[in-house]
Image: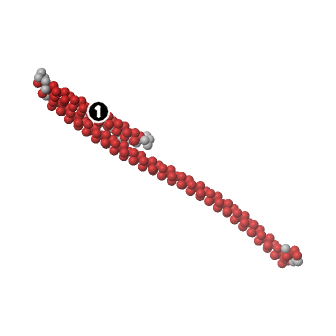
Amino acid sequence: MSGERATPAAGPGKAPSNASAPQEDAVEQAREARATAEAAEMAARLASERAVEVSSRLGQPDSGRHLEQEPAESQLEVDRASIEALEAERLAQDAGRLAEERAVEDIEEEEELVSGVAAMMIADVAAAAAAEAEAMAEASSARTREASYAAQQADQVLEEVRAAIASGALSGEDADR
């Protein structure tokens, strides 16, 4: 088995610097796993070719005794290459799953951000509506105060007219107006 393995660039305790960093890490891991799988596949092919070569040399009369050990060594190399290929394939699958998980996490984070922005926009609209309602209430209150003052003045003039009529200061046509 090969000593090379795809390892995450950011561990669980490390926060990414931006939202796309986890996805980029997963993509990089997938690339590394794919490269490892390709290298293991190439090693398996080479070992297979060597096994064929050794097998053909065994059929030759002048091949030495050391060639009798080569099939076992070649088979060992094929087995190792196969194991490395399987491990690389597993790593590629793991990296693919990790990339999918991180993509889902990124989408969920983006949804939360959009929800937060939408909530802030709704709050801003509600605040603007409340400010407009407050301004209308203040204007209405001011008109109510003006109307109340005008009514007080009218009541005061009416009282003065009644007092003038009662005292006889206003009479006849002047009193009818």
User: How far from the left and from the top, in percent, is residue 26?
Assistant: 37, 40
Identify the residue at image location x=81%, y=72%.
160
Identify the residue at image location x=37%, y=39%.
27
User: How far from the left and from the top, in percent, is residue 174?
Assistant: 87, 74
Identify the residue at image location x=25%, y=36%.
84
One can see residue 170 in this view: no
Front-most of residues 143 and 163: 143
Q: Is residue 115 left or right of residue 141?
A: left
Dot 1: element: helix
Task: Give the quarter of the figure containing the N terminus.
Answer: top left
As drawn, the residue found furthest toward the right would be 172
Q: Quadrant location of residue 19?
A: top left
Q: Is residue 47 left or right of residue 164?
A: left
Q: Which colour assignment does the render follow?
A: secondary structure
Residue type at numbered disc 1 = Ala
User: How far from the left and from the top, in percent, is residue 161?
Assistant: 82, 73
Q: Quadrant location of residue 82?
A: top left
Q: Total of numbered circles in the picture?
A: 1
Dot 1: within a 10 Å radius of its alpha carbon, few (fewer than 14), some, or many (20 or more) residues?
some
Task: Give the quarter of the figure containing the C terminus.
Answer: bottom right
Q: Is residue 70 left or right of residue 95?
A: left
Identify the residue at image location x=85%, y=76%.
176
Q: In the displayed structure, would residue 102 be above or below residue 169?
A: above
One can see residue 162 in this view: yes
User: How far from the left and from the top, in percent, is residue 106?
Assistant: 42, 46
Q: In the displayed structure, would residue 86 be above or below residue 107?
A: above
Dot 1 corresponds to which residue?
A: 39
